[in-house]
Image (cartoon, coloured by chain):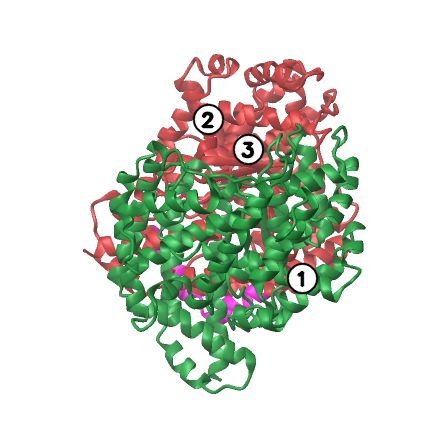
Chain colours: A green, B red
Amino acid sequence: MSWDALVEHVGRIETLEGVMGTLGWDEQTMLPPKGSALRGAQRALLAELSHGWTTDPRIEGWLAELEGAADPVQRACRRNLGRTYTRERRVPPELVGAMARAESEGFQAWIEAKRDSDFARFEGPLTRILELSLRRAEAIDPRRHPYEVTLEAFDPGTSIDSLRDMFGRLRDGLGPLLDAIAARPQVEPIEDEIDPAAQEALHRDVARALGYDFDGGRLDRSVHPFTSGHGPGDVRITTRIEPRDLLSGLGGTIHEVGHGLYEQGLPHAHAGTTVAKPASYGLHESQSRFWENFIGRSRPFCGWLAGRARELLPGADLSAERLFRASNRVERGLIRVHADEVTYNLHIVVRFEIELALFEGRLSVKELPEAWNARYEEYLGVCPPDDARGVLQDVHWGSGAFGYFPSYTLGNLYAASLGRALEEERPTLWDDVGDGRFGEVLAFLRDRVHQHGHLDETPERMKAAVGERDHVEDLLSYLWQRAAEVYGVERG
Amino acid sequence: MSWDALVEHVGRIETLEGVMGTLGWDEQTMLPPKGSALRGAQRALLAELSHGWTTDPRIEGWLAELEGAADPVQRACRRNLGRTYTRERRVPPELVGAMARAESEGFQAWIEAKRDSDFARFEGPLTRILELSLRRAEAIDPRRHPYEVTLEAFDPGTSIDSLRDMFGRLRDGLGPLLDAIAARPQVEPIEDEIDPAAQEALHRDVARALGYDFDGGRLDRSVHPFTSGHGPGDVRITTRIEPRDLLSGLGGTIHEVGHGLYEQGLPHAHAGTTVAKPASYGLHESQSRFWENFIGRSRPFCGWLAGRARELLPGADLSAERLFRASNRVERGLIRVHADEVTYNLHIVVRFEIELALFEGRLSVKELPEAWNARYEEYLGVCPPDDARGVLQDVHWGSGAFGYFPSYTLGNLYAASLGRALEEERPTLWDDVGDGRFGEVLAFLRDRVHQHGHLDETPERMKAAVGERDHVEDLLSYLWQRAAEVYGVERG
């Protein structure tokens, strides 16, 4: 039975990925500083093993046997496994090695360039990374748009055309919203000093209420919050807590809980078939954004949260209204990771447009700062005073992660449609949320998204989940509605 | 260069062992309960890889090439690698599988038997483990005593004859000491309630003072304290803290610090040669016992500790004298893990004698409880009221770990000689300890033990470290001396 052999083989790859995930989690939360080199050697060894298994020549035969399979799991497996096999086989080892070196140099150069706000220091290494990324895309599939091939590592199934269309319409739609908000009086942030230990207790309480299973997961602290799913029963999230920034810490936890719930809800019975895995970065991000924004910044949620805060943050004076308004504060800014829900997508649009122009040869790396600043001026109405707060702010490009940024906004787009669909299907939604009953919300996501793993590609999964919806319009109408509640704006 | 190929290959094995160690540490400190099955699958996968690499047929050729090598690292490598290769190659896969199943059943049976204090439940599974252990020893080397072959997995280089001799003389010497102590008034234990967080701060302070490098290590809590060394820069220890048991928690930390210092001091430059590894369980244990007992229960240490406690345990009333006396309290008891420094070795002697009798066919598994109780009566003067507090108390046999127990007492024997040698060499030793200066003590252990890794077998390393000493006499004279200070006894 070659299917059994395939499942055993892929199961080993997946088990090894879980080990690598555990080491990655440990590195960011537990590893003593002097252990870095050792951890690097451990990860290199496992990556080498994983590469060898992923490109095992037996896979070619198994894939051929699966041609025309009727079983949906087998069909999905053929598609997913075939893609990783092709991607890993077609890139020559020299190119893999060159890319690893370029990324390592690029990361180092980025750190120094950002520190000194000196883009020139970064230009050469980034040019090299871009050149190698294009060569890699060409090696994988010379007939397709190199950006789509690159994007595929994060968001398989999403076409360059749909991205161009959605991101263009979103950009055009967000401008008027941002202008309308800017014309209104600004709302107050929450900067009260609150004991971090008490905040953490609130985070745990909220995570539990949303359905995060602590018997199969953990919540720890790390510099950058993240979720690490290692397989059934071991999905870990982290957060960051600051005494004077309750909402960004709590929002971060709710965000990671969204990721964590997706990982906990994957169809683990299909281990070894590639189907028990998340379908894409974009869909993963939709789960975090759904909980963080659609639920977590809603008025009913803030009402429930105010009650939990009264109990768990003694001394803090946080009314539902204050929480709601501060949660939905919108402000034009320079830095993506500090952006609110409205401007965030414009930060991403800038990056997407620049990546595309680089990949299509319409822009050179040298011209990056200028192109960046012009777009920030045009879309966000702000101009970076230096490159550290401009084109050098993100780690992604220096690490070779072209094509990664779109998944953030894809997540927002999908989350908006999931939210709209849920609102239409369940008239009692906001009553439940106001009462702290999240079970039906989770059940909806389990049913429409989680339990399907990587059976379908994301665009198809979204159609099956919510029908034919215009994600851009869903997101814009939702953002206008929130802004109407908080800022009193009206869509023209 | 076949030596380079060997070093690369063994380096991979050692790196993989570090990964396995990290997973093991995580399992006992971090893993969510529902992640157990996943972790089992991860460990099984890595164990399979490790077995495959350890029995790689190229090793045979490399070993042949190393025959007659003059370089001490290469000679040690030939001995160490040859041993693991032989041990893993000669045991047929069916026997490995049968052993794994028997251990898993034995562990389960032991849990139930201990819970119900029902030895009969354990008899069958333990008989099977013994039978398979004998078959394994026979497969590895039919010409040697099967117990020595089994012991070799933990304490290579130690002969059955030296064990018989040392353990016999120790047993005979401890009886009179225990009788003398029992005739004196008992000293008071310390059972003050002390805030666990404050205790932990003291543990960290002490660990740092002894030289444990927190930039290359961690201290966490776990049910059973342990040390996990994963390679250079990543050595982790754990401890257990109870509000009313300051000394056993602190002693546990000092014990693990001793293990941790050994791991941190290994000659990591020799990675990939088998030499950058601990030489034996017995030598490892000598490092923990040295710090825990010889240093940590000494009067000068207790004087220094009282000062640290005044600062870090506000409200606690712990004089140097109270700490010293309570640290050296001796009491006949039933349970090994609660035993003091004097009786501990008698608990081990009982187990060693029983294991040997089982391996030599002089005792059947059925007769175990009776043999156990008779020895406890004779050596310790106590009689277990049930098997749960007798022959069923330890996890080792049910897990297949025959031959493990002697390393505990070997550790005490070696530690005593290291202590005596250090006292003789450094007249200022106890002044330094009293002032909290432990640098020279650590330097001595680094010089005589740590930096040699597994270059020599343990008995030879001990001779090189302290000269020709009688470990039994060193241990007995040291214990008599402590008992003289605390109980006022005099050696006859």
Instruction: Tell me the subunit letter for badge 2.
Output: B
Residue at image position (35%, 51%) is: B80
Residue B93 counted in the magenta span:
yes
Task: Give percent across and percent down for residue B269.
Answer: 30, 40
Choose the circle earlier in sequence order: 2 or 3.
2
Q: Residues within 10 Å of mark 2 (few under 14, many from 20)?
A: some
Residue B373 can be seen, yes or no: no
Nearest to viewer (mark 3 / mark 1):
1
Question: Foreground: A350 or A12?
Answer: A350
Quarter holding residue A259: bottom right
Residue A322 counted in the magenta span:
no
Which amino acid, by three-letter code, is at mark 2?
Gly
Indicate left or right for B433 with A44 as reference. right
Which span is picked out in magenta?
A: B80-101
Disc 2 from disc 1: Cα separation: 60 Å
Which amino acid, by three-letter code, is at mark 1?
Arg
Q: Residues within 10 Å of mark 3 (few under 14, many from 20)?
A: many
Quarter holding residue B103: bottom right
Task: Give percent across and percent down for residue A77.
Answer: 49, 75
Question: Foreground: A211 or B243?
Answer: A211
Residue at image position (71%, 24%) is: B194
Residue A238 can be seen, yes or no: yes
Q: Disc 2 designates what residue?
A: B211
* Contact check, label 2 and label 3, Cβ < 8 Å: no
Q: Please, what secondary structure does the residue beneath circle 2 have?
A: loop
Quarter of the image that includes the C terminus of chain B: top right
